[in-house]
Amino acid sequence: MPNGFARPAATVACAFLIACAPVPAFAGGIPTTDQGVAAAQVVVDRSLHLEGASNARDVGGYRTSDGRTVRMGQVFRTNALDKLTPSDLAVLHQRGVASVDDFRTVVERAMSPDRIPEGARSNWFDVIGTNPANFPALADMPSMYTVMVSDPGASRAFHDALASIADTDGAVLYHCSAGKDRTGWMTAVLLTLLGVSREDVNADYMLSNQYLTGPRTGIAFVDGVEQSWLDTSFATVERIYGSFDNYVRDGLQLSQDDIARLEDKLLA
């Protein structure tokens, strides 16, 4: 449990599988939108090259508005870890992963338990499953991307994940099932908070369409991501909070000291 940010009592377990299912996307990747994927290539190869988690990649390497760079090797985003091989676990250990933060529901965790690298701490920050009243709204992706901003339980989970990054002595890995929706919004929040441009935030989000591999299901919300979904979350921030800064302060409940600690760890 991170020390610097407070975590409320254990949340209610949820027996519901949400749309961010651990089903892989298109073999070889699918065409992305023209949201500037090239702009994300500050670092050409972000992949961790894990055999059991194709959407595992480094969050660092992006320029910020003040000319600094998000450090590599500090934060990793992935899809589910239940299929990691011994060599995958060795890679994560060698990269210094000290904390693994899981955004999935209790059912997802039971069906596909994490495999954790040696020496790493495991945290559970359920983004969606803390409030069963959310489930009817999860019939489509725009609704889910709205709930990830509007629901207090989701805000607590993202707060705690940011706390984990700030407070962990070592690298942090966070994930959901496919590593694209809950993990995608978390990454968008983190990079925006650090001063990365919206263009690069969008491009990083869309990279899930390249990194996810496997058979195509033909189901849009399983096979990849769409820029409009991420736009929905940012629009919800503006509608509810008026600005991203207000969302960080009032929704995520991060202080200026909290933000400074994240910047100290992650910016060079």
Image (tube, grey):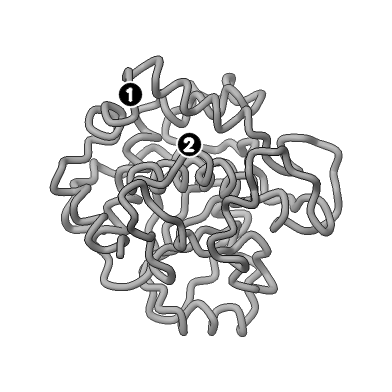
Location of residue 56 with respect to 260 vertically, above or below: below
* x then y, percent, for residue 53: 65, 65
Q: Residue at x 37, y 70 (%)?
A: 171
Identified by mark 2, the residue type is: Gly
Evaluate whether residue 268 shows in this view.
yes
Q: Give the farthest residue toward the front.
A: 67
Q: Residue at x 22, y 61 (%)?
A: 264
Q: Where residue 88 appears, x then y in whole percent?
A: 60, 78
**225, 103: nearer the viewer:** 225
Classify mark 2: residues with Cα within 10 Å, few (<14), some (14-19) or many (20+).
Answer: many
> Residue 243: which numbered mark, if any?
1
Looking at the image, residue 156 lies above or below residue 70: above
Q: Looking at the rendered structure, which numbered label has been put on residue 19? A: none
Disc on the earlier residue, 2 or 1: 2
Separation (CA) of disc 2 from disc 1: 26 Å
Task: Find the residue positioned furthest to the top.
Answer: 239
Regarding mark 2 in the picture, which secondary structure is present there? loop
Circles 2 and 1: CB atoms closer than 8 Å: no
Figure quadrant of the N terminus: bottom left
The image shows residue 191 at horizontal and vertical percentages of 41, 48
Q: In the rendering, which numbered label is found on residue 129?
A: 2
For image coordinates 65% across by 78% down, the residue present is 85
